[in-house]
Amino acid sequence: MSLDRLLAEARAELDRTIALRRRIHERPELGLVLPETQRAVLDELADLDCEIATGGETSAVVATLAGARPGPTLLLRADMDALPMEEQTELTFASREAGRMHACGHDAHVAMLAGAARLLARRRAEFAGTVKLLFQPGEEGFGGARILLDEGLLDAAPRVDAAFAIHVDSSLPAGHVALRGGPILAAGDVLSIDVVGRGGHASMPHLAADPIPVACEIVMALQSFVTRRADAFDPIVVTVTRIQAGSAGNVIPPTAHLLGTIRSVSERAASRRASRRRTASMRRCTSFPAIRSP
């Protein structure tokens, strides 16, 4: 198989690949059930001679391409779901769904995997073994991979011997691929903290137990906590990405909620991280006795 010829064929597919990516980008969907995205994938694979299986609990799609001779079974995987955020790019193909956006590149991943399926389908007489192409929903914190595995979507013979995935990176020049030995992307856990205080009027904070200053202290304390507890050569990254509290400018809220992520790149760091999971809940934001109005 000539690499130059393969690249030339890939470039010939570029317009079709871009069109699929933009179709998905305009209609971003969240979580595990992505009917529009699944329909776009199935439409793109419809003219290929491959076996198609779809998920029951999710909108996953698995396309199986058998080669001409026996050999290993490789899985190529792309994630499908978007993020709950507003798009402000003003692109001609910007999201048409309020509060949803393909900001992490999963629309490109789907289009790229569909393009790979077309190239591989033309060459099935040239390779040994089987290729399974997995379009996976629920990557953004919904456990989509675990759900589709539990329901047996990849159990059909032949069983998968190895899996491969890539991720777009806007910091790299177009046309370049980056790789390294060992882990290149981190495992992630959700950080969720509820600070429970006592609400009151903003003009009389001494009669309340304000959770907001405590939430701010927690954010700052987490930064030094990581630098003093985690090995710099086996890092853990803790990032608070959302703080929610209150609904009015003159009312101290009774609670504050922090949401974020904890990332690690080794099993050792992940086990250390898991052993220290805590649900933080403060029933009182001050050690002083409650002050009552006269």
Image (cartoon, rainbow, N blue to C red):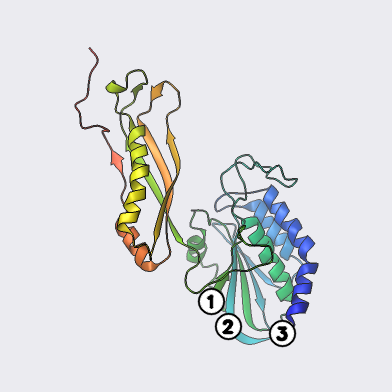
Q: Is residue 182 visible?
A: yes
Q: Mark 2 = which residue?
A: 72
- Is there CB contact under 8 Å for labels 2 and 1? yes
Q: Amino acid at mark 1?
A: Ala
Quarter of the C terminus within the rendering: top left
Q: Amino acid at mark 3?
A: Glu
Q: Earlier in the sequence, mark 2 or mark 3?
A: 2
Mark linked to residue 162: 1
x then y, percent, for residue 93: 73, 47
Mark linked to residue 126: 3
Q: Residue drawn 47% across and 72% down?
A: 182
Of residues 271 and 131, which is closer to you in this image? 271
Q: Going by the image, does 199 lie left or right of 100? A: left
Q: Is residue 160 visible?
A: no
x then y, percent, for residue 207: 28, 21
Q: Going by the image, does 244 lie left or right of 291? A: right
Q: Secondary structure at mark 3?
A: loop
- Is there CB contact under 8 Å for labels 2 and 3? no
Vertical arrangement, residue 101 with respect to residue 56, above or below: above
